[in-house]
């Protein structure tokens, strides 16, 4: 897997033609630093976790940018908050110039706050993630279902006509089980994967969370991280989580906000726009990486996963993340939510963007029956959605009716 082409590489270079500065944000160890190595040789990289680089920049950020006005990348920029106003001054001094700076960060709350306060209108933001199925299967750049979907006038039949699979189902299952973090792909042994996941959680807790939130009760937050495996894919009840942790409901909410803001957890709000039925309004969430989820659940292999009670929730979360990762890599602005009525009708993922309103149901099954499509079909009709899509484990894409498609995950 060494040298895997990242799907957002083209977007990075495109943004450098558009903005003075580009920010790469994403969870720790997802490959941001490696992506910086694709920049031309004239670029200089400064790592703010390296003491010498930190001291050089933190001593006088304004002087640093006067001495280094072009082709500079700063890794883990959130570690020097004063760098953001200094970067704004440096950009404004030569506002017409593009492609001058790249800054990365793995702690979203502080980084995005600094960007919004100091660099609004001057920066293009790219959210990175661990490997997607597209990247792990080495098919980046190939014609895809989501690329076709961006063409608003494309009819359902044209979205799947001639579409090719990215790999076999066993390879997709392997990706699902292992997740997308680069390190376990580079060293695929089961022992390394298990030890790496344990160390990763420790690193996340002590290097990121404790540094951002020094007053946090680390024992309770560690218990919260262990709870996330069982909560992934469920509609959240903050009162239940608070009781399990012996904390207040506001504290439980804060824990979820921290996990979402540091890219470990995906919070999906409930879809309630123009709902004609009574809908559930509690949020739902997923651990963003299926491999990390399986490590927290102590699932040893694919066979054990296929018989595990969390199979459906794990598959659903992995597919949701794949769709979001591909859209982010394409630079597509979108909003995601889920839909559930008081009567139990449900749509796993609702995506809204310039491409329209698209409803997605996710099944770890080859065959989909009429009853399985009822909730999706009703939602599409009631919301006048452009399309309903069922992600399956089938061998070929299928058109169920004029607005419903079945797309195997391997074809995403």
Image: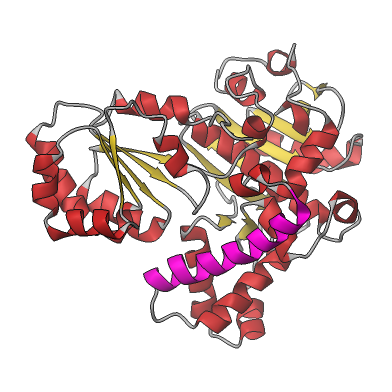
Q: Residue 110 lies in what quarter of the image?
A: bottom left
Indicate the position of residue 378 as horizontal and vertical percent values.
Answer: 75, 39
Figure colour scheme? secondary structure
In this rendering, position of residue 190 left or right of residue 10: right
Indicate the position of residue 91 as horizontal and vertical percent values.
Answer: 15, 38
User: In this view of the protein, can residue 98 be seen by the observer?
Assistant: yes
Residue nearer the viewer, 152 or 45: 45
Quarter of the image where the N terminus is located:
top right
Q: Residue 167 lies in what quarter of the image?
A: top right
What kind of secondary structure does the magenta stretch mostly adopt?
Answer: helix
Quarter of the image where the C terminus is located:
top right
Against 135, is 340 above or below? Answer: below
For the image, the number of numbered tags is 0
Question: Which residue is at a point 61% across and 48% down the rendered structure image?
Answer: 183
Residue nearer the viewer, 274 or 333: 333
User: In this view of the protein, can residue 351 be seen by the observer?
Assistant: no
Q: Which residues are magenta?
A: 189-212
Question: Which residue is at a point 53% across and 85% down the rendered structure image?
Answer: 248
Question: Which residue is at a point 73% across and 48% down the rendered structure image?
Answer: 178
In this rendering, position of residue 209 left or right of residue 164: left
């Amino acid at each position: 897997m060494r040298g895997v082409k990242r799907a957002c590489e083209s977007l990075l270079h495109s943004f450098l033609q558009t903005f003075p500065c580009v920010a790469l944000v994403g969870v720790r160890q997802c490959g941001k630093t490696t992506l910086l190595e694709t920049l031309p040789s004239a670029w200089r990289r400064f790592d703010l976790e390296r003491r010498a680089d930190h001291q050089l920049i933190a001593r006088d950020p304004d002087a640093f940018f006067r001495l280094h006005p072009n082709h500079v990348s700063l890794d883990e920029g959130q570690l020097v908050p004063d760098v953001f106003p200094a970067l704004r001054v440096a950009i404004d001094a030569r506002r017409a110039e593009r492609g001058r700076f790249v800054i990365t960060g793995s702690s979203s709350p502080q980084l995005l706050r600094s960007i919004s306060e100091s660099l609004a209108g001057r920066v293009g933001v790219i959210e990175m993630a661990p490997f997607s199925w597209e990247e792990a299967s080495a098919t980046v750049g190939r014609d895809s279902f989501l690329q076709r979907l961006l063409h608003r006038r494309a009819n359902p039949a044209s979205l799947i006509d001639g579409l090719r699979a990215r790999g076999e189902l066993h390879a997709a299952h392997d990706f699902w089980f292992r997740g997308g973090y680069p390190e376990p792909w580079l060293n695929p042994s089961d022992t390394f994967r298990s030890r790496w996941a344990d160390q990763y959680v420790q690193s996340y807790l002590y290097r990121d969370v404790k540094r951002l939130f020094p007053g946090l009760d680390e024992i309770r937050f560690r218990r919260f991280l262990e709870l996330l495996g069982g909560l992934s894919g469920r509609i959240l009840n903050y009162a239940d989580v608070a009781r399990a942790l012996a904390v207040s409901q506001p504290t439980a909410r804060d824990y979820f906000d921290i996990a979402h803001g540091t890219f470990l957890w995906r919070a999906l709000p409930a879809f309630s726009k123009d709902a004609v039925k009574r809908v559930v309004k509690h949020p739902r969430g997923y651990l963003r990486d299926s491999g990390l989820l399986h490590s927290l659940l102590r699932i040893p292999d694919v066979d054990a996963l296929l018989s595990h009670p969390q199979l459906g929730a794990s598959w659903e979360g992995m597919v949701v993340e794949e769709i979001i990762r591909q859209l982010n890599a394409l630079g597509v602005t979108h909003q995601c939510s889920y839909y559930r009525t008081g009567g139990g009708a449900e749509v796993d993922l609702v995506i809204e963007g310039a491409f329209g309103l698209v409803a997605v149901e996710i099944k770890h099954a080859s065959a989909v029956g009429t009853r399985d499509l009822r909730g999706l079909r009703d939602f599409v009709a009631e919301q006048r959605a452009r399309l309903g899509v069922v992600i399956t484990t089938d061998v070929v894409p299928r058109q169920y009716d004029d607005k419903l498609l079945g797309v195997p995950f391997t074809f995403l």
